[in-house]
Amino acid sequence: MGFKSGTVVQELGWDDDVDEDLREAIETVCGAEMVDGDHGDVVDVVVLWWRDGDGDLVDALVDSLTDLVGGGAVFLLTPKVGRPSYVDAADVAEAAPVAGLSTTTTQAAGPHWSATKLVAPKSARR
């Protein structure tokens, strides 16, 4: 997913169904634990775990920009097709631009999750 040592990653939407191996891999590469929504300082990347039924995706994406540095990325992690609480790709494609984000890539992120990389404009600060 492109993480590097020293990257400050904020994790939102954690629940007991997340991929702990993926979380551990991100923290190992970055060299630090992911911070939560109460961090209060800028972050380089946001990892947002999202499931169908979690609420309004646009609101969650806008909230994910609160601490994100201009030009930073949001990785939207959703259950893969056929998994419980799967999120339709069309819902992501519709919500991202409303939240001021552009969809770049989607890739597998473990056996049960997909990661969609969303990029904020370099001047975005909410």
Image: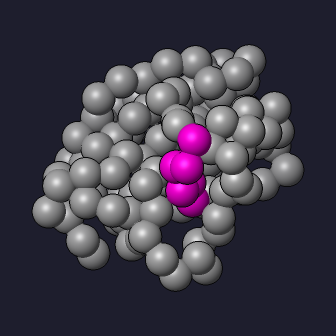
Give the residue at x 37% y 46%. Answer: 73
Magenta segment, prevailing SS (helix, strand or loop): loop
Specify whether residue 63 is in view: no
Q: Position of residue 4 (x, y in %)?
A: 53, 37
Give the residue at x 40% y 35%. Answer: 117
Q: Is the image coloured rainbow, by chain, by secondary structure, or in one colour?
A: one colour
115 relative to 95, above or below: above
Name the quadrant containing residue 29: top right
Q: Position of residue 26 (x, y in %)?
A: 67, 38
Residue 107 as seen in the image, left or right of residue 13: left
| Depth order, front residue of 21/18 | 21
Q: Position of residue 3 (x, y in %)?
A: 52, 35
How many dots with numbers?
A: 0
Residue 3 as seen in the image, left or right of residue 98: right
Q: Magenta span has 39? A: no
Specify whether residue 38 is in view: yes
State which region is magenta. 5-10
Give the residue at x 70% y 22%. Answer: 110
Q: Position of residue 1 (x, y in %)?
A: 51, 27
Residue 114 as seen in the image, left or right of residue 92: right
